[in-house]
Image (spheres, grey):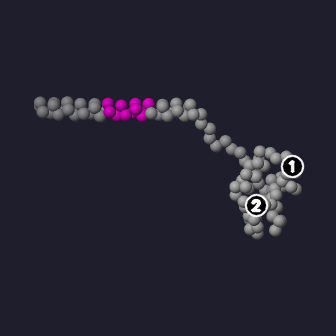
Amino acid sequence: MDEQSFERTPEDEIVAAYRAAKPGVCVVCKYPLDGVPMSDHRAVTCPECGFVTQFRVRVEMVAYRDPQSHEERVRVKRAARTDRTLAAMAVVVFLVVVIWIIRILVGVL
C-alpha cells in the first residue's frame, strides 16, 4: 500500500518524523529503507529480503511541573535552609557562651 492511501493519525506522523530524522536499514540484510513506503499498519517491508519492521508508538507522561508550585517549593526550601542556618548559629553562640562561663568559673576556683 502507498503511504498516502490511508488516513494518517498522530502516531503515523510521529513514525514518519522518526523515519525522516533517522533513515534506517533492514536489520536482516542492511538494505537502506529511507525511501520505502510505510503500510497502513505502520510497517515497512524490506524490498530486498521481505523482512517486515513494524513501528509502535507509546506515549508516556514523563513529568509535569507547574512553574508556580515549583517556585513555591524552592522558596520553602530556601526558608528551611535559612532556619537551619540560624539554628546552627544559635547553637554555636550558646556553646561559646557556655565555654566562656566555664573558663570564668574555673579561673575563680
Q: Which residue is mark 2?
A: 34
Which numbered disc, 2 or 1, marks the residue that appears first in the sequence?
A: 1
**Which residue is at the front of the view, 106 or 94?**
94
- Amino acid type at circle 1 is Phe
- Where residue 87 appears, x then y in whole percent? 36, 31
Indicate yes or no whether the magenta region holds residue 22.
no
Q: Residue at x 40, y 30 (%)?
A: 83
Q: How many marks?
A: 2
Q: Is residue 89 a member of the stretch shown in magenta? A: yes
Instruction: Tell me which corner region of the image, top left, top right, bottom left or bottom right, holds residue 54.
Output: bottom right
Q: Which residue is mark 1?
A: 6
- The segment highlighted magenta reads 79-90
Image coordinates of residue 108 in percent, x first then y, are 11, 30
The answer to whether residue 106 is left or right of residue 96 is: left
Residue 108 shows which numbered tag?
Answer: none
Main secondary structure along the magenta-highlighted residues:
helix
Q: Residues within 10 Å of mark 1 (few under 14, many from 20)?
A: few
- Does dot 2 land on a helix, a strand or a loop? loop
